[in-house]
Amino acid sequence: MIQNTALKMERIKINQVEPEAYKAMIAFDKYLGTTGLNPLHKELIKIRSSQLNGCAYCIDMHTRDARSLGETEQRIYALSAWRDTPFFSVEERAILALTEEVTLITQKVSDETYAEAVRVLGEKYVAQVIMAIIIINSWNRIGVATHLMPALR
């Protein structure tokens, strides 16, 4: 078995080293609670973005959070292949497409994806979805950069 020794290196804890920056992230995250975003939509955004960014800590956290909201194991397992399943609604497909393109920003957000999201969700909801994507991408980058690891349950 090959071990990844990079995972053993101790990394900083942002909340301890830069507490003010961490507080700002928490405040940014709390904004989501003031929006009209469906809680399950928020979790789908968080899971899919975390999958794309390879943030094990966030995948673990948000799949548990999604299950607590009633999300099914089947949909969670199929999320990385959402285009190839009948499990997701038109709204969820628009959200997931936008999540992928904003997360993979160097590939740009296509006019087609953006227009479909606005058509299906409306401008205000799209703005809130984009902010949710930005927030989880920020958390993912903290998690990946500092090697946050989920606990074995």
Image (spheres, rainbow, N blue to C red):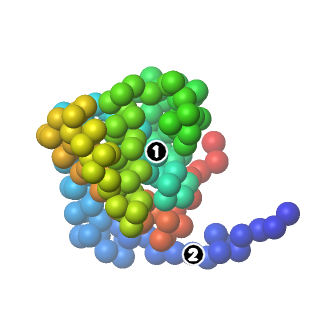
Identity, as a three-letter code, of the amino acid under mark 1: Ile
Residue 105, percent from left and from top = 36, 62
Q: Please, what secondary structure does the residue beneath circle 1 have?
A: helix
Of labels 2 and 1, earlier in sequence is: 2
Residue 141, percent from left and from top = 42, 65
Q: Which residue lies most toward the right here?
A: 1
Task: Say which residue appears at 39% left-offset and 25% top-offset.
Answer: 89
Image quadrant where one finds the N terminus: bottom right
Q: Is residue 145 left or right of residue 102?
A: right
Q: CA distance from mark 2 to mark 1?
A: 25 Å
Q: Which residue lies most toward the front here?
A: 112
Residue 90, percent from left and from top = 36, 28
Residue at the spot of label 1: 47
Quick check: 124 above or below 21? Answer: above
Task: Say which residue appears at 21% left-offset and 39% top-offset.
Answer: 118
Quick check: 95 above or below 132? Answer: above
Residue 10, numbered circle: 2
Residue 21, percent from left and from top = 26, 70
Q: Nearer the viewer, residue 116 or 31?
A: 116
* Mark 1 surroundings within 10 Å by alpha-carbon count, few (fewer than 14), some (14 through 19), many (20 or more): many
